[in-house]
Image (cartoon, rainbow, N blue to C red):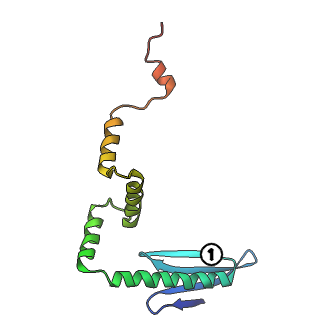
Amino acid sequence: MATLFTNGTETIKLYESINRGKPLYQLAYYTGGRRVQRNFSDQAKAKRTAKRVLGTLAEDSELVDNLNTPELESLVAAKKVLLPGYALHVAVEEHAQAVTRLGKTTLREAVDFFMSHHRADVPRLMLDETATQFPWG
């Protein structure tokens, strides 16, 4: 039997069990369409975490509810250009980190520079393989 925590919209279940003679508390909930399970050895910590996660889920739910049409269209367009299985939030995080590190250089300029200096058609060889290709004296 599970203990339920809810904020009216989202629900988190707290399961209690015994593992190797010790109590185990497991939180189970959904976020981003995926099931999340987190284990705790301390019931109080599991309950605090459940309440904190419910707050975060409520904030996320409110953000989604308040999206306007152009923002929704932008999300749909972004999902269409991503590779299959590549999470949108991961792509945005990587892009933000790259732009921050590049400073005044654009991401496109950095990619162009990299591609012009790292030819894909040149085979990578180990030093001993390279040495056999040169005539020695």
User: Relative to 55, is 84 above or below?
Assistant: above
Would you say 84 lies left or right of 11 here? left
Look at the numbered disc 1 and give the secondary structure of its residue.
Answer: strand
Which residue bears the numbered disc 1?
Answer: 39
Instruction: Work out whether 135 lies above or below 36.
Output: above
The N terminus lies in which quarter of the figure?
bottom right
Q: Is residue 18 left or right of residue 87?
A: right
Count of marks placed on residues: 1
Circle 1 crowding by C-alpha within 10 Å: few under 14, some 14–19, many from 20: some
Q: Is residue 136 visible?
A: yes
Quarter of image, res 112: top left
Which residue is nearer to you in this view: 6 or 26? 6
Query: In the image as oriented, which residue stretches furthest toward the front?
Result: 104
Image x and y of residue 96, in percent: 39, 60
Please indicate whether residue 81 sits to the left or right of residue 38 in the image. left
Residue found at x 45% / y 29%: 125
> Which residue is at 27% across, 75% downward?
71
User: At 39% across and 85% down in the image, what residue appears?
Assistant: 62
Spot occupied by residue 23 in the image (x, y as percentages of width and height): 71, 80
| Front in this rendered view, residue 48 or 123 | 48
| Residue farthest to the bottom, as pictured | 8
Q: Position of residue 109 (x, y in %)?
A: 30, 47
Give the residue type that dot 1 points to.
Asn
Estimate the x, y position of residue 122 in percent, counting from the top left. 36, 31
Task: Say which residue appears at 23% left-offset and 75% top-offset.
Answer: 70
Point out the residue furthest to the top here. Answer: 137
Q: Is residue 46 left or right of residue 105?
A: right
Residue 86 visible: no
